Amino acid sequence: MSVTWTQFRRARRRSRQAWLVLAATGLALLGGAAWFFVAGQFGAAESPATGPSEAPVLAGGWMKAVVAVRAVPAGSAAGVLDTLAVKGRAPKDTYDRSAFGQAWLDVDRNGCDTRNDILRRDLAAVEFVRGSRCQVAGGNFQEPYTGRMMAFRRGAETSAAVQIDHVVALGDAWQKGAQQLTAGQREHLANDPLNLIAVDGPANQDKSASDAATWLPPNKAFRCHYVARQISVKAAYRLWVTVAEKEAMKRILGSCPRQQTIVPRPGR
């Protein structure tokens, strides 16, 4: 009888250990997913105060930095927001997409157009069109605006499901300082990897030319990075913000006070 009881206790102990292992594995997977979205793919939502957050701006070996009007100031996103001019919107009736140059130029002169550069940077398991080293045929990624896993497949009826969004919309930029930029500077703004991310097509259409006061990503976990990236772009190209826009940005950054600006770095 004593042997049977001992065996029972050992079996129960092993069962508890197995459940603990399963629980720990589940937590690790959840933590890994959170890291990928918050720290792996798009940089830390709250970076240490010692430096700017990492972000997928440049990819080492094949992407080159685009020259902005000035370098992105490193430091607190909220602090840099306070340095941006606050003004009303300029008239929009003179806006024309062509003022920012031909769409998807090869501004960094790496031999590939900007759209394919961003797809290659943001997607995982990238496949290329046969015979091309630039044209992305497919891949998958954790889409930032919705937080869903998505697949991209090149095709007349499928390509639009994944679009390349200007984080600071060109229409918004036009009304907030871009009219004063040179034609070359506007081309750079439209093709700067800092201002571009691959996103869900319908979400991008919903955003349109909105600023942070009128549209934010449905995925709340991405909002701190999104706002910090807008601030970084506006600082780099000397664009201004409206009163309502600044208030919306400050409200978002209030939930992540250590959020840093997004500074392009070699190899990132």
Image (tube, rainbow, N blue to C red):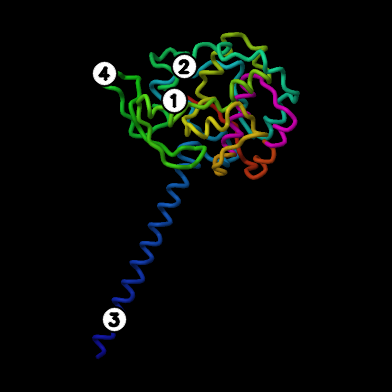
Q: Which residue lies furthest to the top in this view?
A: 183
Q: Is residue 186 above or below residue 240?
A: above
Q: Quadrant of the N terminus?
A: bottom left
Q: Along the polypeptide, which appears first: circle 4 or circle 3?
A: 3
Position of residue 210 measured from the top left corner of the image (x, y, whole percent): 62, 29
Who's the residue at 38% across and 36% down the image? 151
Q: What stretch is highlighted in magenta?
A: 224-248
Residue 1 is covered by the magenta coloring: no
Q: Is residue 20 above or below residue 111?
A: below
Name the front one of labels 4 and 3: 4
Lateral position of residue 207 relative to residue 25, left or right = right
Position of residue 204 measured from the top left corner of the image (x, y, whole percent): 52, 31
Name the secondary structure under disc 4. loop
Local packing at callout 4 (Cα closer than 10 Å; few below 14, some 14-19, many 20+) is few
Name the secondary structure under disc 1. helix
Who's the residue at 65% across and 40% down the image? 252
Q: Along the polypeptide, which appears first: circle 1 or circle 3?
A: 3
Q: How far apart are marks 1 and 3 (CA)?
A: 59 Å
Residue 8, numbered circle:
3
Local packing at callout 2 (Cα closer than 10 Å; few below 14, some 14-19, many 20+) is some
